[in-house]
Image: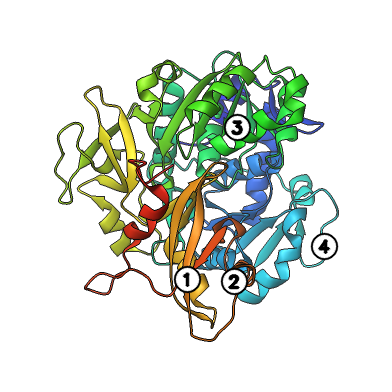
């Protein structure tokens, strides 16, 4: 399995087909592949060697698309940077896996001084924006123009495709190592479901391209002769305009994004009839939102993909037909092709159908491990099964229902937030004596990051001051959206904070601890 194999097939069979659409810029397959081969040569000329990591800190673009192909073409591995992180978090992820070449666009140039200060080993910054390269950077387009194309290194199989950083239970991000085989296994499973990217698809990429969910949909599309319509970032108006202008057939959004598009004033008068498939993930869609979305996107079928970065990213699929069954509105779907899923007890034994346990996944999509963290890898992958940290049950037909999270994680607006990361940031404030962070239900974001804080005596602090402080240490989406100040936290006899008691105040009789 080789990520760049589809390029060789496409340039042989349909070199003149539009491959990328970015604003007014349209590039054919032949043009894109030529540029990819030149970017690969340029990276090698900059000292990138086999297996090296190359980072990209940028909004979505056709150059991001080229990067995702050019790095393996050069024999290296991608390290797409989470654009929502603070400079400290970004620097950690780049230093952790020794990324010394970084592509940066206009949106993130202001962050460069802070990154350089924290990263003395950062060798080369490639400017991939739309203007002139600032001093101290190398111009992307000049590299393309002056570099001859090189032969594909043909990295494949268990060769490392990329390192994708996700939040950590210890407060530090973990680098998920994904191979070519991992990513393509998920891509074939998504494409093999037969519910998206059919005919002559035009796939809209609006979700951030650093995220493995977007890369999973993108890689699936590249196996199916897809034209990639790319917008810089998600906005409801931008999605509607792109669908109309480019006759988009398929797109990936999280439920929060779907709700924002449904509510957008532009949607009411837009022609969205070209849409055939909407793939969503990160959380189930509510019945009310699904009903409204169906009325908005009348020509589209809805497919839910459940998974995680460590699964590259797919575990289960809930098909458009499944969405018609009212008993499956809260289901995460059934195991995708090439994937096994079971519900296990604490020692790894499968529990009877209907009983709650931990969701475990096995297949060639399971990550190679966490970069530089063998103990965390061994804890997550046991006997070949990836233990997801999600509590769930499986019915007699094999449908999986998520009911809780065993690991201390919140999913807000489609983004994973580990409580430990937020608690570490809160604890840095001199006024905070102790704290606990939980997820609570939220109509817009699914779940909201909520902090329960005990202050030191006679030290004044309000919620706004505390959240402003957090923003200097962690990404904005991780910052608590609500804060409760209390005299004490519920503790077990062993001195452990009883978060379930804190959650019970907000989840009540919901029957689930996830939303």
Query: In the image, is residue 214 above or below residue 166?
Result: above
| Quadrant in the picture for the N terminus | top left
Look at mark 3 in the image and give the residue it sits on.
258
Question: Which label lies toward us, 3 or 4?
Answer: 3
Question: Which label lies toward us, 1 or 4?
Answer: 1
Give x and y (percent) for residue 309: 44, 46
Give x and y (percent) for residue 88: 59, 69
User: Cβ–Cβ below 8 Å for labels 1 and 2?
Assistant: yes
Look at mark 4 in the image and give the residue it sits on.
134
Look at mark 2 in the image and give the residue it sits on.
466
- Comes first in the chain, label 1 or label 4: 4
Q: SS for tag 3?
A: helix
Q: Residues within 10 Å of mark 4 (few under 14, many from 20)?
A: few
- Comes first in the chain, label 3 or label 4: 4
Q: Residues within 10 Å of mark 1 (few under 14, many from 20)?
A: many
Residue 339 picture quarter: top left
Give x and y (percent) for residue 105: 74, 53
User: Cβ–Cβ below 8 Å for labels 1 and 3?
Assistant: no
Q: Which mark is residue 453?
A: 1
Q: SS for tag 1?
A: strand
Closer-to-camera residue (349/20): 349
């Amino acid at each position: 399995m080789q990520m760049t194999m589809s390029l060789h097939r496409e340039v042989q069979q349909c070199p003149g087909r539009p491959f990328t659409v970015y604003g007014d810029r349209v590039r054919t397959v032949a043009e894109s592949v030529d540029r990819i081969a030149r970017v690969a040569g340029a990276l090698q000329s900059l000292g990138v060697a086999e297996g090296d990591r190359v980072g990209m800190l940028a909004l979505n673009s056709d150059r991001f698309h080229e990067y995702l192909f050019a790095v393996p073409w050069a024999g290296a591995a991608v390290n797409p940077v989470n654009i929502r992180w603070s400079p400290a978090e970004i620097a950690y992820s780049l230093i952790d896996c020794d990324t010394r070449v970084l592509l940066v666009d206009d949106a993130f140039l202001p962050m460069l001084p802070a990154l350089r200060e924290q990263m003395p080993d950062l060798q080369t910054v490639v400017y991939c924006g739309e203007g002139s390269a600032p001093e101290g950077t190398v111009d992307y387009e000049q590299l393309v123009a002056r570099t001859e194309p090189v032969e594909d290194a043909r990295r494949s199989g268990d060769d490392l495709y990329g390192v994708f950083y996700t939040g950590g239970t210890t407060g530090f991000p973990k680098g998920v190592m994904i191979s070519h085989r991992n990513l393509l296994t998920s891509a074939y499973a998504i494409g093999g479901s037969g519910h998206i990217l059919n005919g002559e698809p035009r796939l809209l990429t609006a979700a951030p391209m650093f995220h493995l969910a977007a890369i999973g949909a993108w890689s699936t599309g590249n196996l199916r002769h897809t034209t990639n319509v790319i917008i810089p970032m998600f906005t409801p108006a931008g999605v509607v305009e792109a669908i109309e202008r480019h006759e988009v057939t398929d797109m990936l959004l999280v439920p929060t994004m779907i709700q924002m598009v449904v509510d957008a004033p532009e949607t009411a008068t837009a022609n969205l009839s070209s849409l055939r498939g909407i793939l969503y993930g990160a959380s189930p869609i509510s019945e009310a939102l699904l009903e409204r979305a169906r009325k908005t996107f009348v020509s589209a079928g809805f497919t839910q993909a459940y998974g995680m970065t460590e699964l590259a990213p797919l575990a289960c699929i809930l098909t458009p037909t499944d969405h018609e069954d009212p008993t499956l509105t809260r289901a995460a779907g059934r195991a995708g092709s090439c994937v096994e899923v079971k519900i296990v007890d604490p020692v790894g034994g499968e529990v009877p159908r209907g009983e709650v346990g931990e969701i475990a996944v096995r297949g060639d999509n399971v990550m190679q491990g966490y970069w530089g963290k063998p103990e965390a890898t061994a804890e997550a992958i046991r006997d070949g099964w990836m233990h997801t940290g999600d509590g769930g049950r499986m019915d007699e037909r094999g449908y999986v229902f998520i009911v809780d999270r065993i690991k201390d994680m919140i999913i807000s607006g489609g983004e994973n937030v580990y409580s430990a990361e937020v608690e570490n940031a809160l604890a840095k404030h001199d006024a905070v004596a102790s704290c606990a962070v939980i997820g609570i239900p939220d109509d817009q974001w699914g779940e909201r990051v909520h902090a329960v804080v005990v202050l030191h005596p006679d030290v004044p602090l309000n919620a706004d001051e505390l959240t402003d402080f957090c923003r200097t240490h962690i990404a904005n989406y991780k910052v608590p959206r609500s804060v409760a100040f209390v005299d004490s936290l519920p503790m077990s006899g062993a001195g452990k904070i009883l978060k379930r008691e804190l959650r019970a105040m907000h989840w009540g009789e919901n029957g689930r601890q996830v939303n």
